[in-house]
Image (cartoon, rainbow, N blue to C red):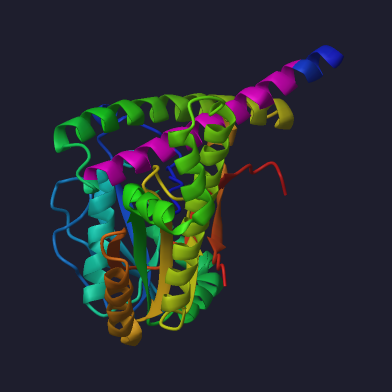
Amino acid sequence: METSVTTTESSTHPAEVDLDGIYVYSIIESAEPRTFGRIGIGGRQDDVYTVHYKDLAAVVSRTPLVVYDPTRENVLAHAHVNEVIIEEGFTPVPMSFGTLFKTEKDIVEFLEDTYAALRDVLVKMKGKLEFGLRVNWAREEVLADIEREDEGIRRLKEEISKSQQSTYFARMQLGRLVEQALSAKSDAYVRDIYEYLRDAAIASRSNKPIGDKMIMHAAFLVERDRAEIFDQKVQEIAQRYEGKLSFRYTGPWPPYNFVTIRLQLERSAVV
Amino acid sequence: MAGMKFIFGQVADLADQELNDEGTLRDQLLLLQVQLEDGDIDEEEFAEREADLLARLREIKARKLAIATEQAAEQDGVPAEANVKARRRVIVETPFDD
């Protein structure tokens, strides 16, 4: 996930703040004012509502004008608002976590200035949702498989266990062969999973696996009306590898991995 | 002049280093989250380590902002204050692998 945090011009610490700002979660297509409940970030039960320009709406809530740390709590609060928007049938284009404006007028200006680009992205993403898939492997199980199946590795292991001497290089070689075999297995699993899910998804993005148990960390862009088929296929492939791979499947999310809207400071002196 | 260049180089190196540190801290945050979800650590340990990582992340950000503000002032000949109020540019990206 793109987690670049955008801050407002003021980087005031929470304790020093008496000003309110407006947090923006995402952009949706809606000409009608909407509310999504008192689920705003910051723990004050702020109402989540929309700020409009033409047929575009920013989904926002009031908040103290602070820099939000990407804590799990804050990120989940941000994500929850987008979840609710999806449940209500919208396809939100997500803003980066932590995007704040000072006033509603600033947001309208932002929508106006960026109207064409935002419309473009909304059209592109219409009816599309993101699903996350992380796959961990049971390394020991896979290793046991390799030792059963791989002739070369099996023979080398036997040699080492029989021989009393000069096993150093044999061990080195065994280690290398095992690493190679593991990495080939991992690649094959990942390829197979992508292959199996490809038809049900519009696009995919692979992120760097996190930690040493994870072999796949991916996001899939899926048509809303094909989401059930995609679900089904994920269940099937997870069953195929039961005992060896464990799947963690999340979503639907707004297309975090396929659209990013960031605000960057630009020096006014440079034209 | 060479002396100045050297100093700018040092500042740039420092900025790069901080950027790398920031990336590392973000990776560690992600790992922590995964460990919590996989049940490898409990809520309490998570909260403790998250707080530590975020504090370090905040420090780096504050230093980076200070460096950026200083550099902008050097280059533009405008006081640092003026640059903090700079315009914001909107970046919309749609990265696709396939």
User: Where residue A80 sits in the image (x, y, percent)?
Assistant: 22, 60
User: Where residue B73 sits in the image (x, y, percent)?
Assistant: 66, 27
User: Where residue A249 sits in the image (x, y, percent)?
Assistant: 29, 64
Q: Nearer the viewer, residue A131 or B58?
A: A131
Location of the N terminus of chain B (image quadrant) = top right
Residue A187 position (above or below residue B74): below
Q: Residue at x 71, y 44 (%)?
A: A270
Q: Is residue A144 left or right of residue A6?
A: left
For the question of whether residue A20 can be seen, the reply is no
Q: Residue at x 16, y 37 (%)?
A: B42
Q: Is residue B88 left or right of residue A4?
A: right
Q: Nearer the viewer, residue A196 or A69?
A: A196
Q: Residue furthest right?
A: B1
Residue A25 position (above or below residue A130): above
Q: Residue furthest top?
A: B3
Q: Nearer the viewer, residue B48 or A150?
A: A150
Q: Residue at x 27, y 65 (%)?
A: A242
Q: Residue at x 55, y 71 (%)?
A: A117
For the question of whether residue A77 can be seen, the reply is yes
Give the overall secondary structure of the magenta segment.
helix
Q: Nearer the viewer, residue A239 or B39?
A: A239
User: Where residue A108 sits in the image (x, y, percent)?
Assistant: 42, 64
Residue A67 position (above or below residue A94): above
Query: Residue A172, located in which quarter of the rendered image?
Result: top right
Q: Count every numbered label the image shows and give the total.
A: 0
Location of the C terminus of chain B (image quadrant) = bottom right
Q: Residue furthest bottom?
A: A225
Residue B9 is a magenta residue: yes
Q: Which residues are magenta?
A: B7-36
Residue A84 is a magenta residue: no
